[in-house]
Image: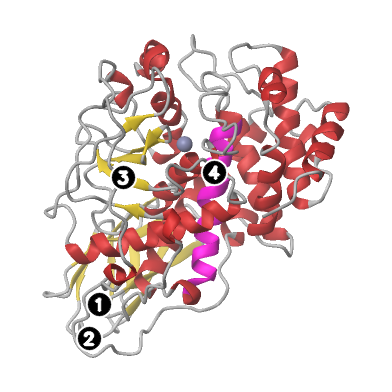
Amino acid sequence: MPTKSRRVLALAVSLAVVLSLSACRTEQTPLASGPGATTGATPPATTTTAPASLPPSTYAATSVPSLSPPATPATPSTAPFNFSRVLLADSSSLSPAVESLDRSSGKVVVNGGDTRRPTVPFTFQWGDGQTTHAFFPAAHTYADTGRNYAVMVTAHYADGSTDSRQLDVFFVTAATQPIVLPEGVRVTVPSSPVALASRMPGYSPPARLTAFDDARLDAATRAAVEYVLTAAASVQKDFANNDVYEVDGAFRQVVLLDPEFGGMYSLWFTSPVSFGASATSFSGTPQYSSFFHEMGHNVTLNSPASYYYGGKIDGSANAIFSEAMAQIFQHATAYELINNRQQYGLSDDVVSGIKESGLSSMRIVVSSYQAYVSGGKRFASWNDPSTPQDETFGTFMTIAYKFCEHAEKGASGYRMPLKRTMALLQTFDEDTRSRYDQSHNTEAAATFRATLMAAALSYGFETDLRSELRDLGFPINDTVYDELHRKAAARPLT
Ligand SMILES: [Zn+2]
């Protein structure tokens, strides 16, 4: 893999793009053709036109066309959602998902995998009385598309044990009932190209970015994903205590198509703030969890507004802050949207999509944390450019895991702990920056970075997590920890 050398090569020119890519491999974003390769792009000379803000009425589109009079959905659950099963119990090796669904023929394809690689076919109970046995992918055609189904997929292992996962198949759902969201957090998926201006000297977005035209996204889907992403943006801006850099009084984001890239990345430094996304980002179920992750970069790297992290921590030491926080924002956003589905008027199929993508990315957090522990708890905040692997991966995933674990175990959920975590991180200033010391691999800098994150999580949960993180190999300085807590306590939450 030429990834590391490419990353290093590109650091000087397009650092920000590369940094957000480099550690976003949890999103399976290959680096080989990443935008870091695009180095000669000239930033537009003038400020770009921000996307026209959409009047609330534009959001009155349905997320899924209703066929017939909606039947009572068979599957949707209104029980409180959490990640506990994945986080705190043994994680399942079975990961089925609805790959395609044809509303006119009734044909549904379920694809997936099982890392335990059972040799006996899986059992598919399709929810219409039919049961089949097959390996992935498995197809089934429903005679009645006037209702929804709960599909149960069961794996059979050599030791006689089994594991089951349920999937929702939605033929009919009540449409999303959009509410009016704050004007200042609009996310759009423009149907024609938008010029991006760079706010950072030396950072430029790839010149090849273009719009998702109607062929890639039908009108109903465009309005629906814009609504969900705008709802996510209002959730995330609140997580950040509304302390986010704004252009013309708003935090606008646009999603642009990168035709040469297989994943998704954050362009936090552009105006409007933007995402580069692959052509398949909206195929089938939109990749909500990846969007929430990249949006987490967009928000946290543009915070605090008066001295934002973006550009000031970039390079080999960025990930302990930027990737840990993107992971935390990603899952906290899913949690908030799912549990406030009624308040946001989200349809069952949208909720199901957010849930599935959130659960599967949470499984990656859990397995990465487990690998960090079994690998000897090697704390690292410096991604050595001369090695092929990212030494910081296990460390930032461990921070994300610890946050989610405490959110799930505690009574306070994700929102308040995250707002408090951000409040501490938002004390960032010139002094913090110099001690974070983005360009040097020193013990002092590593200790400061570890202490910053330990202090932030401890402040977030109002619980001293130092011993827990020290047990995980984090070097923490008590004097700095206390100092950071005093600084945070002087900041009101908003
Ligand atoms: Zn990332």
Q: Is mark 4 within 8 Å of ligand 1?
A: no
Whole-Å distance between the Cαs marked 2 and 4?
A: 45 Å
The residue pinned by badge 3 equals 50
Spatial separation of the CA atoms under disc 1 and disc 4: 40 Å
Q: Position of residue 184 (x, y in %)?
A: 44, 55
**Picture layout, residue 416 above or below residue 439:** below
Give the residue type that dot 1 points to.
Phe
3 or 1: tag closer to the N-terminus: 3
The residue that label 2 is drawn on is 146
Q: How is the image coloured?
A: secondary structure
Amino acid type, label 3: Ala
Q: Residue at x 21, y 44 (%)?
A: 279
**Prevalent SS, magenta region:** helix
- Comes first in the chain, label 1 or label 4: 1
Across and down, in percent, residue 226 comes to: 32, 58
**SS at mark 4?**
loop
Residue 473 makes an appearance in the image? no
| Magenta residue span | 321-341
Q: Earlier in the sequence, mark 3 or mark 4?
A: 3
